[in-house]
Amino acid sequence: MPQIGKGNPRIQSPRSLPILVALMVLQAIGLIGYGSVQFLAHGDSITAILAGVNRFIPFAVFTGISNGLVAVFLGLINLVIAVALSRLRHWAWIGALALQGVSLIAALMAYLSQRPNYISMVLGVVLVLYLNQSEIQVAFQREP
Amino acid sequence: MNQPETVAKNLDLEVLRQFEPILKYTLGERFYPMDIDRYLAQSSLWIQTPQSPPEKLIAQGELDRNRLAEIRTGDANAVQYIKFIDPLDILQLARLSINEAVKSVLHPGEEQKFRAGRGRLARVGYVSRFIDALFSLALLWRGRVPGDTALAAAIAYRQMQAEEERYTYYGRILRENGWIVLQYWYFYPFNNWRSGFFGVNDHEADWELITIYCYEDNHADGTIPLHLQLCPEWVAYAAHDDKGPDLRRHWHDPELEKELGDDGRLHPVVYVGAGSHACYYQAGEYLAEMELHFLKPVSRILRGLQSFWRDVLRQGRRAGPSDRWVVFRVPFVDYARGDGVKIGPCQALEWTPEILDEHTPWAINYRGLWGWYAQDPISGEDAPAGPVYRRNGEIRQRWSDPVGWVELEKTPSPSQRSRRLAEQLHKLEIEKEQLIARINEKSLDVQRLGLEVDVLQAMPQLATTHADISVELEAEVEQLRELRLQLDRIANRLDALELMNQQTVGYGEGFRRSHLRRPNQPSPNIALRLARLAEAFAALSIGLVMVGLVLMILFAREYLLVGLVAMVTVLILAEAGFRRRLNQLVISLTIGLAIVNALILIWEFFWQIVIVLLFGAGLYIMWENVRELWT
C-alpha cells in the first residue's frame, strides 16, 4: 500500500470543499446566534440569580439557558471542525458527521414536538450526503 | 460380469487409485464414507403418496442394492424413500444416553469431543441474528429429523464399523469435452450438522463428491501403460448445493494441498465440514450464510436500493460485488478443521473403492430419497436423492455434465490446446481474408458514390436526388469504417494467438485463479474486545430483547416504544464496542437520521421540491442553449 510521505504528491482537495466549509461555518454561526439569543432572552433572570434575588431557577428559564449554552458550545465545535475540514483532517470528517447526527436528532425531535426547523433539516441532510460521498471519503482517508 | 468388463473395471480402479483424495475430518465427526450395502441391509424402503399414510415397500433386512434397483411405477407425486433409523422411544433414548455418559466417564479419551470455539453469532450482524432466531423457531413447525435420530444413527454406524471397518468411495470415469473426468462419490449414512455442530440441518444419508479433471499426456514415453498416462489439471470439491467455477482449483494452485503417496503420486487433500460433509480446500471454519427463499424479493429490493445509493448518489466507499448487503441470511459455521480422522493414501485408514457408471442399476434405476422424507418445505431436513438424481427426480448436472457444472466447458484441456489454437487461427485468417475482400469492394462503392455526389452537387435541378445519394454515401462510409474496425480487431486477435502459438506467451499465474468470483474462504478470526463476553452477548442478545419486549407488553405497555428503542440502542452500542466499530456506528446512525429527515422533507414539501427541480432543470436547459448560441 503506498504510504503518504514526503515523496508522495499531496492529496487533492475536492473542488467543492470550500462550499462544505462555508456551510459548516454557516451552521456554526446559526448555532452561536441561536444560543446567544436564548442566553440574552433570559438576561434578567440570570442577573437576578447571580445577585441572589431568586433562589430557585424556573424550569423554562433553566431550559432556555442550558439550550443556549449547548448551542453556543456546539457552534464553537462546528467552527473548529470547519477549519480542520479545510485542512483535510481525518478526525474532522468523523467529527463533522457526528455533529450532523446531533443536529439531525435535534431537528427530528423538534419536528415530532410540532416545532419543526426545516432549515436545520435541509442543512443537515445536504451536509451528510456530501460528507458521505465516495470522493470525499477518499480525500479524508489519510492525513495530508 | 464377463471378462472384458472385469478387466475394464480393474483398469478404471487403477486410474482412480492414482489420484485418490485424502479426506481430513474435524474432531467429533461421527460418520464417514461407507458402502451402500451395509446401509441398505439396516434400512427399509417406503413410499409416501400425497394425502395418504406412508406405505412400506420393502422391510428392513430384505433391502439390498438389487431390490433397490427394481423399477417401480405409481403415482407421479409419490415420493420413495429409504428409512435408516426409527426414532427412539423414551426408554431407548434414556438407555442410550446413560450408556454414552458411562462410556465417556470410563473411557474419557476414547471419543474426542467437538468444541465449537468462537460463536458463529458473534461473527454476524443483528439482522442476521434475528433471522437466525426465527429460523430456529421455524423448526418447531417445519418437518424435521427428530433430535435423537442422529444419536441412534451414530450408534448403528459404530456397530457396523465394529463388525467390519471399511471406508468406501464410488469412483466414476467419463470423458467430456476432451477432459477425462474422475469422480469420487462418498456416501455417508447421516448428516448431523444441526444436532452435532450447530448447523443448518440434519438428514439421513449424504452424497458428496470430489472431481478431478485430467488429460492424456501425449509426451509420455512408451513405458507407461496407456491408462496411466493421465495428468490432473483441475479439481472441484462439492460444497452443499453450490455449483460454478468457484468450486474449481487448478492442480498447481497453492490453495490446493497435496500429499505424496506410496506410489510416488500426489493426492489432493480435502477438509471435510463437520456433520455437513461439505468439502473445502483449506482447514478452517467457514461462514456459510443461507439465504431464505421467501426473503429473496426483499433482498432484491435492498440490492436495488444499494446500487442507487452507491452508483447514483455516489455514497459510501467504492465497493466490489462481494460487498453487497447481505442482511437477510442465516449464518452458520461449517467446521472443517482437519484435526480429526484422516482417510486416504498413506494415512492410518485407507479407501475401499468401487466402480460406479452409467450402467450401475442401483444408481440409475432408483430415483427416490436415500433417507427419511421429513416433508420439510425448505427441504433441508429431507434426505438427498442418489448421485444421479436431485430430489425432484431431475438428473444432477454434476452427474450428466461435470465439465459444465464448474464452467470448464470454455477451457480446452492442455492436450487439445494447440489444436484448438490452430483451428481458431485458421478460422480468424479466413474471416480476415473475407473482411479484406468486403472492405475493398466497399471502398470502390464509396468512391463511385462520392463521384456521383460531386457531379450532382453542380446540378441544382437534381437537388433531391443529390440529397438522397448523399445520405446513402454517408451510410456506406459508416459501414466501411465499421468493417475497418472489425479488421483491426481481428488483426489484434490474430497477433495475440500467433504469440501464443509460438510459445512466447503462456498462461500466466493469474490464469489459474482468474475464474474465481467468490470462493469459499475460511472465516478470519474477528478481533473482539472481551471476546468471551462478546460471544455470550451475541448468543443472548436477541433472545433477551424478545423476552424484554414481552415483559414490557405485560407490565409496562405505556413505555413500550421508549423501552424498545432503549433496548435496541444498548444492544447496538454494546455490539459496536465489542467489535471496535464505534466510528462506523456513528456514521451509520447519522446516515440513517439523514435519510429519515430527507423523507420527512419530501413528505412535507413534495410539490415544492418538484417545482424547484423543474425550475432548476428549465434554467439549466436555457443556460446550455444560450452557451451554444454564444460559442
Image (tube, helix red, strand yellow):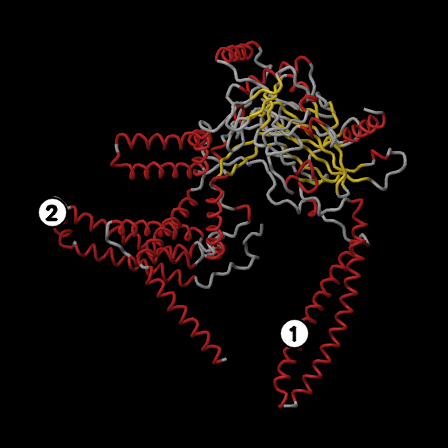
Residue picked out by circle 1: B475
Q: Which chain carries label 2?
A: A
The reply to whether dot 1 and dot 2 touch (C-beta < 8 Å) is: no
Q: What residue type is labelled 2?
A: Gly
Q: Residue at x 73, y 61 (%)?
A: B492
Residue picked out by circle 2: A52
| Image position of B564 with respect to A45: above or below | above
Counting from the top left corner in percent of width and height, residue B181 is at 74, 37
| Image position of A82 with respect to B392: above or below | below
Which residue is farthest left? A53
| Image position of A19 with respect to A63: above or below | below
Q: Residues within 10 Å of mark 2 (few under 14, many from 20)?
A: few
Element type where label 1 sits in the image = helix
Q: Nearer the viewer, residue B275 or A81?
A: B275
Q: Residue at x 32, y 37 (%)?
A: B564
Q: Which of B266 and A82 is in front in this view?
A: B266
| Image position of B106 with respect to B51: above or below | above
Q: In this view, does B78 lie to the left or right of B438?
A: left
Q: Mark 1 lies on which chain?
A: B
Q: Which of B169 and B83 is in front in this view?
A: B83
Counting from the top left corner in percent of width and height, residue B256 is at 68, 36
